[in-house]
Amino acid sequence: MASSAVDIDRKKAKTPEEPQSTIEGTTSMASSLVFRRFCCFHPPSSSPSSVFSKKKPLVFLGSPQVSTAVLDALLNASSAADSAFEVAAIVTQPPSRRDRGRKMMPSPVAQYALDKGFSSDLILTPEKAGEDMFLSTLKALQPELCITAAYGNILPTKFLNIPALGTVNIHPSLLPLYRGAAPVQRALQDGVKETGVSLAFTVRALDAGPVIASEKFEVDEHIKAPDLLALLFLEGSKLLIRELPSILDGSAEKKAQPQDESRATKAPKIAPDEAWLSFDQEAYVLHNKVRAFAGWPGTRAKVVVVDEKNGHDDILEFKIITTRFHINCSSQATQADEIRFVKDALVFPCGGHTALEVLEVQLPGKKVVSASAFWNGMRGKKLKKFDASKHFSHLSS
């Protein structure tokens, strides 16, 4: 397996331009995608361009924005005159209601493919990858290989048996570490110093197939999950294009290394209730959680707003967006409940004589603001850490 070390926080990722999130006729287009996904599909033998093509048909499966980097790399590589493959179809999640307008919109991968001129008849959007009609359509394509990148659906054995050369997945971790739905988030939550991306054959067991190749990267202590995820899929697309010749000629299957099950770790899906921060923990633990849960579900905290003029206390909830941390702080700074504003940060006392510096926050229904802007909005009111037992006992007395 190939590996290299770079600082991924300082490396500029040239990701494909993000498609417009809303376009005219989105609802009707999304509906037609659902209708056409099987009914209007024509096997490649009926296509004039495919009759004379000697390129091996490849099917790509992906759904979120990060997957478009992989699709872009495949489409660009397949357009070369000497390319050994073509993207015969794209499989993605069905249209869903997104954004404030709640309009039915195609997945980012589907939208990106349409913007690139890919035929809508060849964009397949099954609810589940085990649907008989979908599997019949896939068989008609006679794919040599399937490539997955954050597709978001479990692939049954009936699916895996169709492509002649198997299915290869781009997984944003150094397998067998962090198998599962949230490898980047869980790695950042654990505060790892290095991570990477793996190219592996797909088997029925979760992320357990033989590894074709991997790339290793150093992790900056301030990078957040969305940025790290995008960078890893960008690097994964390069790794895929590099290894595709060996995958297509069958030699990759021989060189792929089985995973060491004794080293395997899991990366389970994040639950919304994990978003809450407990300031009894040490600051570096909270800082890592803020980075890991950036984007979704975010990290939340409650504070007590003390108005000394009228003697009222109010509970305020907000999201914590960006942080730093300090260790070996003075006992006076870390044992008190008071949240201070120092320079550009709200300083929360935390466990283990540490302090979390909060640089950006977001109130419900509002935009992200700096800690300075938030503090100015307090108009002289004080902030204290929220302790449910203390606060409610105070109210009951």
Image (tube, helix red, strand yellow):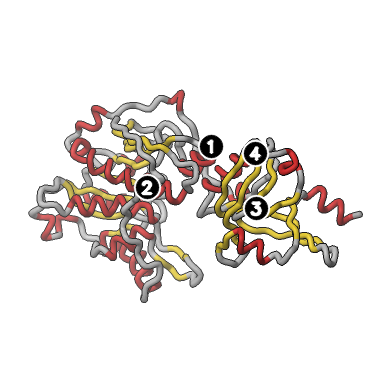
Quadrant in which residue 287 is drawn: top right
Question: Which residue occupies 35% across, 52% down?
Answer: 67
Q: Which residue is mark 4?
A: 282
**Can residue 252 be seen at all in this image of the molecule?**
yes
**Disc assigned to residue 342:** 3
Instruction: Work out whether 167 lies above or below 301.
Output: above
Cα–Cα gap, marks 3 and 1: 28 Å
Viewer-side label of 1, 4:
4
Residue 14 at x, y percent in the picture? 31, 53
The residue under label 3 is which amino acid type?
Val
Quadrant where the N terminus is found in the figure? top left
Question: Which residue occupies 69% across, 37% down?
Answer: 353
Cα–Cα gap, marks 1 and 4: 13 Å
Residue 27 at x, y percent in the picture? 40, 72
Instruction: Work out whether 369 lies above or below 152.
Output: below
Farthest-out residue, left: 52
